[in-house]
Amino acid sequence: MERIANAFEGLPDRGDRWHQDLLNQMNLAIPEVCEPVLTAATVKLLRPALQFRHFLRHAYAVSLEPARLRGVAEETLAAQRAVQAELAAFADALAAAARA
């Protein structure tokens, strides 16, 4: 996603919200150039993983709940499948545009 953002619009500023901003950028269409890389539904699927990552980076001496970890892992796997499918569709669209 970083390479796509860099090639089309540039990377978002590296700050506290960098990952969220990158996801939001991947959900934007570039008029007359390309559709969004990720759908709003996929971005929504990725948010729990981002929230967990943020929590984990800032949680010191916190006990992790196995059930919650399992839930985050399942959500992340679902998001991964969606991201892979949408990245493949985006690559196919770029290839088709290059042939046109």
Image (tube, helix red, strand yellow):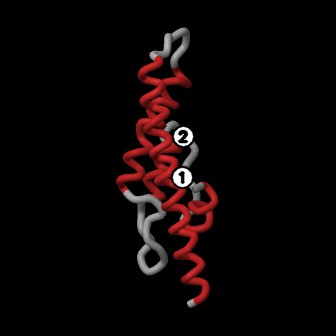
Q: Nearer the viewer, residue 100 or 55?
A: 100
- Mark 2–mark 1 Cα distance, whole angstroms, equals 9 Å
Q: Is residue 51 above or below residue 93?
A: above
Residue 51: x %, y % from top left: 44, 33
Residue drawn 46% across and 54% down? 82
Mark 2 touching mark 1, by CB under 8 A?
yes
User: Hey, what amino acid is under mark 2?
Assistant: Gly
Quadrant location of the N terminus in the rendered image: bottom right
What residue is disc 1 on? 12
What residue is disc 2 on? 15
Residue drawn 63% across and 60% down? 3
Residue 19: x %, y % from top left: 52, 44
Residue 55: x %, y % from top left: 48, 25
Relative to 31, 56 lies left or right: right
Q: Residue lying farthest bottom?
A: 100
Q: Is residue 47 above or below residue 98?
A: above
Q: Is residue 10 above or below residue 32?
A: above
User: Please, what secondary structure does the residue beneath circle 1 have?
Assistant: loop
User: Hey, what amino acid is under mark 1?
Assistant: Pro
Q: Nearer the viewer, residue 89 or 26?
A: 89
Residue drawn 36% across and 55% down? 40
